[in-house]
Image: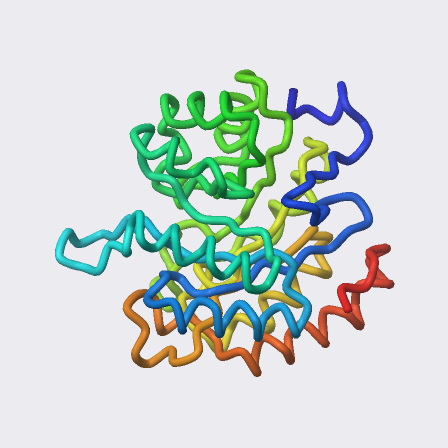
Amino acid sequence: MANRKFHPEDTVVNVGGELVGGEHFTLIAGPCSVESEKQIIGIAKEVKASGARILRGGAFKPRTSPYSFQGLRESGLDLLFKAKEETGLPIVTEIMSVRHIDLFDKVDLIQIGARDMQNYELLKEVGKTKKPVLLKRGFANTIEEWLMSAEYIMSEGCKDVILCERGIRTFEPYTRNTLDLSAIPVLKELTHLPVVVDPSHASGLSRLVKPLSLASVGASADGLMIEVHNDPPHALCDGAQSIRPEQFDDIAKCVNVMLPICNKKRII
């Protein structure tokens, strides 16, 4: 179902009225984790003003250490819904368990995180909801394995899957992961599904988010998913890779210049 041979036209996914794929380029932005009502609504307003069309924010957070902040959970979802009411931005947030599916009824785009890319029971249950899904690549998975995970979702009736390249684990420790730019044009050959890039998780370093974002646009990505925080040094999660709203605004302006060259509509 994900194979371009049987579906030659690009799939365009409708996420709460915002289109992802085809000639559309989509900026997704927001904090790694929802921390408070003031924080998420404030950031949502700022990224929207800069051209973001979908708001990201973690309510349930998978963390390597069980002692790290793991999100506000249900109350975090409620804050995301409030931010949506205030700004009109559709929301994307990560699901971690089939037990939480009913809680995601008002979520516009359900995210499957890198750690769950091969959680096949979760993939099947999310696919049954028929909601748009953003599927992140596992940090040790091949492109073929990634596409097979997308196939799990699509085989259950969900045709609206967005692939998200977020870096893979290599022998290089300087960055958090290694952004696989080559995966973008390869996926464009193999599948009709939209491909977005998460330069924040790929590098783990805020100063690298801009160059990796522009490189992703040049490599034919359909969008970017960027972590933006109003106070990165005091963020409860992933502050080192988060950029400030004014930095996001700068990236959006640079991206906008590149889009006509890449046969994409301007975002602003």
Residue placed most toward the observer, 106 or 196:
106
**Which quarter of the figure has residue 130?**
top right
**Which quarter of the figure has residue 34?**
bottom left
Residue found at x 64% / y 44%: 15
Q: Is residue 147 left or right of residue 233?
A: right
Q: Is residue 185 left or right of residue 177?
A: right
Q: Percent from the top left, x then y, of residue 48?
A: 63, 68
**Which quarter of the figure has residue 22?**
top right
Quadrant housing the N terminus: top right
Image vertical order of residue 199 relative to residue 97, above or below: below
Image vertical order of residue 244 relative to residue 127, above or below: below
Q: How is the image coloured?
A: rainbow
Q: Percent from the top left, x then y, of residue 209?
A: 53, 70
Q: Is residue 88 left or right of residue 41?
A: right
Residue placed most toward the observer, 91 or 213:
91
Residue found at x 49% / y 41%: 106
Q: Percent from the top left, x then y, of residue 59?
A: 35, 52
Quadrant housing the C terminus: bottom right
Residue placed most toward the observer, 29 or 175:
29
Q: Percent from the top left, x then y, of residue 25?
A: 73, 55
Residue found at x 68% / y 24%: 3
